[in-house]
Image (cartoon, helix red, strand yellow):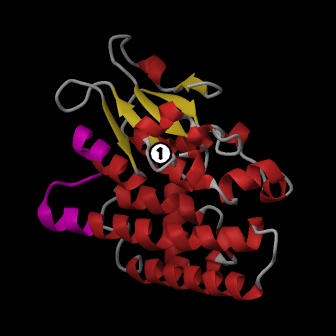
């Protein structure tokens, strides 16, 4: 793919040269972190292909063959279930796939698996989209709309409260540490941008600090940190702002 930067995972050097690394199409955002954390937790070798969403890499025709929704993350596993390469897009589907592939962080016992799925899809349908809208209207929108900012910050606060209540009698969202926690964690990192005070949610705060100390989480969230930009940088970059939020995106597909 033209213009897309790649680098081999820092962990891959620990593996045999005959072990094929998973190809991770990624940018350092809460959605991208889900997969880099999972790969690190599972100690899988992987190669990062940076999808620079500020430069339009997500519209590259070769990337669209892997991720037709022009969104990262996505993966290509050269050793798919039938021994042939398999591509997977959508972060929740990738987490489930990697959990099934490795037998880690995605339990097979039905009741526990259902609990993991509940909280995984809760993040996919609630925490991620609502926090994303809070980020957009408070940090990235060129026009400040007080109603929109307040509406999404209140909803994120409600969702934090849901997590806080759940974590009052559960160490992790589904009992044991799982892909559900990995999915949610990255969206809590920028809590200040969401208008939240994490100390107001003591059980969530305890959970957040515990996960942040995991070595694999530190490694996973550090992938591509050199490419992260401040919201103010994006707000003032008209070309990047148009790529992410402007009109005519559907014409690039």
Local secondary structure at mark 1:
helix
Image coords of residue 229 (percent x, y): 76, 48
**Which residues are the magenta region?**
97-116
Q: Quadrant of the N terminus?
A: top right
The vertical placement of 248 against 217, above or below, is: below
- Visible in this render: residue 91? yes
Residue 161 relative to residue 103: left or right = right
User: What's the residue at 55%, 79% (across, down)?
Assistant: 202
Q: Nearer the viewer, residue 186 or 138?
A: 138
The vertical placement of 200 against 96, above or below, is: below
Q: Nearer the viewer, residue 192 or 230?
A: 230
Q: Nearer the viewer, residue 198 or 239?
A: 239
Residue 238 highlighted magenta (yes or no): no
Disc 1 target residue: 37
The vertical placement of 253 against 50, above or below, is: below
Mark 1 residue crowding within 10 angstroms, few (<14) / some (14–19) / many (20+): many
- Residue occupying the far top of the picture: 17
Residue 99 highlighted magenta (yes or no): yes
User: What's the residue at 75%, 65% (across, down)?
Assistant: 140
User: What's the residue at 51%, 66% (across, down)?
Assistant: 128
Residue 84 relative to residue 63: left or right = left
- Visible in this render: residue 223? no
Image coords of residue 27 (percent x, y): 59, 43
Residue 230 relative to residue 29: left or right = right
- Residue occupying the far front of the picture: 251
User: What's the residue at 49%, 31% (across, down)?
Assistant: 62
The part of the image, by quadrant, that contains residue 135 is: bottom right
The part of the image, by quadrant, that contains residue 226 is: top right
The vertical placement of 161 against 207, above or below, is: below
Image coords of residue 17 (percent x, y): 38, 10
Q: Main secondary structure of the magenta part?
A: helix
């Amino acid at each position: 793919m033209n213009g897309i930067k790649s680098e081999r995972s820092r962990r891959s050097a620990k593996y045999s040269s005959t072990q094929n690394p998973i190809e991770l199409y990624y940018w350092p955002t809460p959605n991208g972190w889900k997969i880099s954390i999972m790969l690190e937790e599972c100690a899988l070798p992987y190669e990062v292909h940076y999808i620079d969403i500020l430069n339009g890499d997500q519209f590259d025709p070769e990337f669209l063959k892997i991720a037709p929704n022009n969104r990262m993350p996505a993966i290509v596993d050269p050793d798919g279930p039938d021994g042939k390469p398999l591509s997977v897009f959508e972060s929740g589907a990738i987490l489930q796939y990697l959990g099934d592939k490795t037998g880690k962080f995605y339990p097979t016992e039905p009741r526990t698996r259902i609990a993991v799925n509940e909280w995984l899809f809760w993040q996919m349908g609630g925490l991620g989209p609502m926090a994303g809208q809070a980020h957009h209207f408070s940090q990235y929108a060129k026009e400040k709309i007080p109603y929109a900012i307040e509406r999404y910050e209140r909803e994120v606060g409600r969702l934090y409260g849901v997590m806080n209540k759940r974590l009052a009698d559960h160490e992790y969202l589904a009992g044991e540490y799982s892909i559900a926690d990995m999915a949610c964690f990255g969206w809590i990192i920028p809590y200040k941008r969401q208008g939240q005070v994490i100390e107001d949610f003591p059980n969530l705060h305890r959970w957040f600090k515990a996960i942040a100390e995991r070595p694999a989480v530190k490694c996973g969230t550090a992938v591509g940190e050199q490419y992260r930009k401040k919201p103010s940088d994006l707000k003032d970059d008209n070309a990047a702002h148009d790529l992410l939020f402007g009109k005519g995106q559907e014409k690039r597909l």
